[in-house]
Every structure is written in C-alpha cells, then in structure tokens.
Image (cartoon, helix red, strand yellow):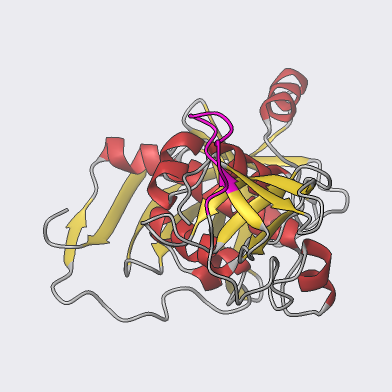
Amino acid sequence: MRAQLGDQLVVESPATGATRRDGEIVGLHHTDGTPPYDVRWSDTDEVTLVFPGPDAHIRHMEHGPPSAHEPYQPGVDELTKQAGTVSDRTSKGGAPDSGDIGRRIAAERKRQGLTREETARRAGMAPGYLAYLEERPADPSPGSLIRLADALGTTVAALRGGGIDLPPGQGQALLHPQLRNLGDDECRARLSTHGVGRLAVATPDGPAVIPVNYEVIDDAIAFRTAPDSVPAAAVGQEVAFEVDHVDEAMSQGWSVLAVGPARVVTEPDEVRRLAERAHTRPWAGGEREMWVSIQPTRLTGRRISAPNQ
C-alpha cells in the first residue's frame, strides 16, 4: 500500500463492502508512501495516526476511484490504540495543550519568513494539514512533529514547549563559531518594530535590568509602564536597552544594544499615536499607561553563526 498527500483512505465493512469511514491523508511518515499515515477523518475532522488494516484501501484522488481495491497485508488494526484520537492523547496528560503547539509552529514559521506552502513541502505534508495544526486544537503525531521540527530547524521539545522555564543557550557551542559585529542597518532590522527587550537602568537600590514590551516608532524605542515602577526610573537618565535571539537548535544567535536618553511622553497627540500603533499591551498587566521613549544615540550588535554564514 502506497499513498500520496491528498489521497483518500477508505475503510470498508468486510461483510458488505460499504464504506464505514474515510478521510484525507494529510501526513506521510515514510518517503515511499507506505503506512502509517496521518488522516483527517471526514466525519469528525480529527487527525489521527492510522495503520491501515485489511479492510482499508487507498483512493488515489488524482486518478479517480480505482477499479479494484489495492490489497494490504493484515496484522495491524485500522487505528492503533496507542496513537489514539486527539482527545485520547491529550487527556492522558502526556501532551501539552495542543493549541500551544500550533501557535509555536506558526510563530517559528513566521519568524523565519516561511509560507505555509514552503513549510509543508519541507515537512512532507499537505498545506491544509499545516493550516489545521496552526489554527485548530490538534495533537500531531510524533512523526509529524519530527518532520516539522526538521523543516523549521528546531526541535520537537521546543515545539512542545519543553524547557520554556529554562534560560536559553544551554546547547553545545558550534565547532568553529564566527562572531561578527552588526552594522547600523542590521541592528535596526533586528531591533524591528516590537517585541520584548531588556531595560538596564540605575535605581536607588542599585542597577537593575527589567524585561519590557516595546515598540519602535520613528526610530525611538517606546514602552508603557507605571509611574512608581522600576522602568519608570529610566526617565531623565541615559539607559541601555538590549534585545536578542538565541537559536537553540543551531547554537547561534544575535544581540543588539541601544544606548540613549529616556524621557516620559506627555504630549496628548504623541501619547495617542503611540497607543494606536502599539501591537500589544504590557504582558505584566495592571495599569501601565505611562509611556517612556528612548532615542538611541548608539547602536551596536553582534552575531554568532557558523563559519559559512
């Protein structure tokens, strides 16, 4: 039995030959198209890992319905109990919230500037199945996760959210790492438009480094805080602001440091413009309506990569 992405798996009743169940093959686990398959069932729209039994055959959709059923050697049930359904795997507590997996897949894909079609092609799955994973609560099979991790240059553990409470950069260093300085344009590109950065500021209790949600608007770094908070102590000082990214799978990354004076934004039109262009509210929550703006006077950055990059 061999199938391609988009083919249909049909399971029939051994006694009557009537179709009991059918679904689209949205994931392959072997390059030669042999079982098992990830199948999205037409009756439930759930995706499960399937080892076809003797009562199953493939309908090759590009050729239309076959004239005779393709045989398959018996010995494995139609649907492995070990694989289970979406609800089975999640309810046992072994998998995290499956919606989180889809969000991590989508975030990593977009971070790398990949389309769904390109990512699906790299992972050997249908674009529709990738859309299903990203947009719907789903628990992809281990094989699908392995292929997606490989396509995105990351790990299955990272897609599952493993190690989110650990500091980044615990992997091994590259054999021959290349450390180079970033130019101003590269620094600005990586500083980007928004995200989470670290503010270094002097306080009455000593120096502090605080993570804040930030925006880049008209070349200035802006963030919201509360008047009595530690980040508010930046007002009237020259401060440092740092953003970085660590690629655990590839043992490489970059950092950008911006230095400049911080001021509080009080002009109503400017406050309104900042609020309108903000991508998100502060993750820390609470009342944080005081806008602080940093105008960088110095930008520096460094990148660690493989020698050939």
Q: Residue at x 73, y 24 (%)?
A: 276
Q: Is residue 308 left or right of residue 28?
A: left
Q: Is residue 170 left or right of residue 172?
A: right
Q: Which sits in the foreground, 34 or 136? A: 34
- Residue 8 seen anywhere in this rendered image of the structure: yes
In magenta stretch: residue 271: no
Q: Position of residue 256 (x, y in %)?
A: 37, 53
Q: Which sits in the foreground, 255 or 61? A: 61
Q: Position of residue 274 (x, y in %)?
A: 68, 28
State how many labels appear: 0
Residue most extreme to the right:
287
Q: Residue at x 69, y 60 (%)?
A: 48
**Occupied quadrant, residue 184:** top left
Residue most extreme to the top:
269
Vertical comparison of 178 with 25: above or below: below
Give the magenta range.
Answer: 58-70
Q: Position of residue 47 (x, y in %)?
A: 70, 54
Q: Residue at x 59, y 33 (%)?
A: 65
Q: Residue at x 46, y 35 (%)?
A: 117
Q: Position of residue 255 (x, y in %)?
A: 37, 57
**Occupied quadrant, residue 97:** bottom right
Vertical comparison of 70 with 76: above or below: above
Vertical comparison of 176 with 211: above or below: below
Q: Is residue 81 left or right of residue 60?
A: right
What secondary structure predominates along the stretch shown in magenta?
loop
- Residue 258 seen anywhere in this rendered image of the structure: no
Q: Is residue 164 left or right of residue 100?
A: left
